[in-house]
């Protein structure tokens, strides 16, 4: 009788123990499952946030596209662009009459790539500017008043009082002279360029306030 009761107590204790262990394991499994769900939701949320941040960064870093203004042969926009289809007043190299303020002279102009090219020597004479040429390096230095303009053959950069500024096309060496867009030289020294089609005269007029 005592042994039978002892066996019954052992069986009851074993059952209680197994039930307790099983409940604990199930609870742990449920907690682990909850943790996995929480981690999944976190990484999923983090991924969405990263995508949103990437989209925002792309929107912020996207280049601002503004409507490009027209480029003209007689206006130096000081931007690195050019319109090779600019309608020019002449279609072949020609010596044209020039009226610079009250002075009348002639300039040999070369049309090309939507620009009118003039030699540094000729433009300096028309504007009464000082000129120094360095033949070996093909550099021209023009000065008038407080303005200094430096250009170099093969380069589309002009230096105005030491500030590097883009030209519409590169300066070129022709017949031992350095040619560059007339708009660059004239505008740099404060002159507006226009063409009188009735008289076939190029007009260089000082801009007021310069």
Image (cartoon, rainbow, N blue to C red):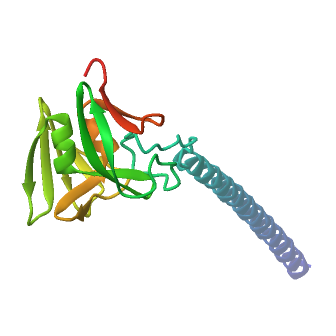
Question: x%, y% of residue 116?
Answer: 37, 50
Please tell me in which quadrant of the rendered image residue 104 appears: top left
Residue 160, can we see it? no
Quadrant including the N terminus? bottom right
Question: x%, y% of residue 175?
Answer: 20, 65
Residue 70, can we see it? yes
Position of residue 2 relative to residue 145, above or below, is below
Position of residue 53 relative to residue 145, above or below, is below
Q: Nearer the viewer, residue 29 or 174?
A: 174
188 vs 46, left or right, is left
Q: Nearer the viewer, residue 8 or 116?
A: 116
87 vs 17, left or right, is left
Position of residue 64 relative to residue 174, above or below, is above
Please tell me in which quadrant of the rendered image residue 30 appears: bottom right
Quadrant including the C terminus? top left
Kindly identify the residue that appears in the image at 10 percent across and 45 percent down: 131
Kindly identify the residue that appears in the image at 16 percent across and 41 percent down: 125
């Amino acid at each position: 009788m005592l042994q039978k009761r002892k066996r019954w107590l052992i069986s009851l204790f074993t059952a209680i123990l197994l039930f307790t262990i099983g409940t604990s394991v199930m609870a742990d499994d449920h907690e682990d499952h909850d943790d996995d769900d929480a981690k999944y939701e976190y990484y999923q949320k983090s991924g969405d946030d990263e995508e949103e941040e990437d989209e925002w960064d792309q929107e912020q870093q996207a280049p601002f596209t503004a409507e490009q203004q027209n480029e003209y042969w007689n206006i130096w926009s000081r931007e690195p662009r050019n319109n090779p289809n600019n309608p020019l007043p002449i279609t072949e190299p020609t010596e044209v009459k020039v009226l610079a303020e009250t002075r009348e002279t002639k300039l040999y102009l070369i049309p090309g790539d939507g620009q009118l090219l003039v030699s540094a020597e000729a433009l300096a004479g028309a504007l009464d500017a000082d000129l120094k040429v360095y033949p070996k390096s093909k550099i021209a230095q023009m000065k008038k008043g407080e303005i200094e303009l430096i250009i170099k053959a093969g380069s589309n950069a002009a230096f105005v009082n030491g500030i590097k500024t883009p030209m519409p096309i590169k300066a070129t060496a022709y017949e031992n002279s350095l040619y560059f867009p007339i708009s660059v030289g004239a505008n740099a020294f404060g002159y507006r360029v226009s063409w009188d089609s009735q008289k076939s005269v190029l007009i260089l007029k000082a801009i007021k306030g310069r």
